[in-house]
Image (tube, grey):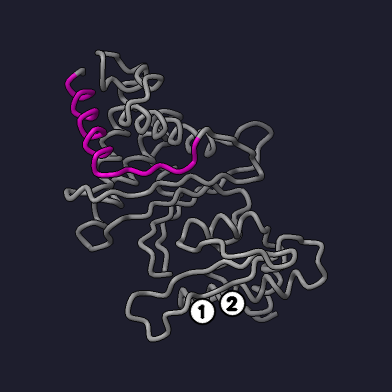
Amino acid sequence: MTAQTSATGRAARLRPDDVLRYLAATGWRRGRDYGRGQIWELDPPVGTANPLPYEVLVPLDQRLRDYPLRMTDLLETVAGIEQRDAESVLGDLDLRWADVLYIRLNEFTLADLAPALTGLRDLALAAARAVDSRHAWDFVRRADVGTSRTGVPVLTVRTALTPDEGEPLERKVTRTMYEAVLGAFGAAIGDSESQAYFPIVNGYRSTRPTLAREVCAALARIGGRSRSGYELRFTWSPDVPFKGDQAVFEFTPQVLTEVARAARELRDLR
């Protein structure tokens, strides 16, 4: 069996929801409905000779007779745009038993990339320590970090989940990370219900000060010295259902200023 044949077979098993969340997180936008599918579009990089957007058709019904062919066409198109081989792209599209965190930076220079990667590591490490301090670094080492090649400045952190009867350990970490980010973001924008978690106003003390301090510092670090802002998006493996109150967080320069201030306040409380 050739590598191309293998990729085609795996493409036929891709789930529409997994493909849609990857496209949404990496700069594609929904264009129009097309039968039992959707057309998604991606603007080419600035300066490209042909300014027309790229298009892919996402089949939404796996029972369709031509579903394998349509999904294979999508895979090959995305691989061509990202200038990667099909097998490599499959690793990002096939999200079975995986939670993925996406960071879309407003600026994407080397000076911005280095602190963003450090902040991502610290964010994952803080959550892992809160769940299982002895194996926190093991979790960080196993996380798969990548970058989008569509011209959109996106970093990805993919966490494979170990099938279990209850909540997988890895999901406990990604859920803790999500809850901490939700608390930090809510407090930074003035949500009073978040103050029990992050003491930004009214003198509230955090119920988990170490986690709160480390998460605030990590979120501020992701923004770099310029604090130009970024979007942070959580996506959850459908094999381990999870419904959060919010999945996308827009860390504007103003929000990052508040988060950095919270990190300093939490440090002073020690």
Neighbours of disc 2 within 10 Å: few (<14), some (14-19), many (20+)? many
The kind of residue on which mark 2 rests is: Glu
- 116, above or below 59, in the image: above
Residue 40, by quadrant, is: bottom right
- 93, above or below 102, in the image: below
Q: Main secondary structure of the magenta part?
A: helix
The quarter of the image holding the C terminus is top left
Residue 119 belongs to the span the image colors magenta: no
The kind of residue on which mark 1 rests is: Gly
- Residue 254: x percent and y percent? 24, 39
- Give the magenta-colored segment's residue range: 246-268
Farthest-out residue, front: 32
Residue occupying image coordinates x 49% and y 41%: 247
| Residue contact between numbered discs 1 and 2, judged by CB atoms under 8 Å | yes
Give the residue number, with chain letter if any, for mark 1. Answer: 80
The quarter of the image holding the N terminus is bottom right
Q: Is residue 54 left or right of residue 13?
A: left
- 64, above or below 126, in the image: below
Give the residue number, with chain letter if any, for mark 2. Answer: 76
Whole-angstrom CA distance, mark 1 to mark 2, is: 6 Å
* Residue 133 appears anywhere in the view: no
* Residue 126 appears anywhere in the view: yes
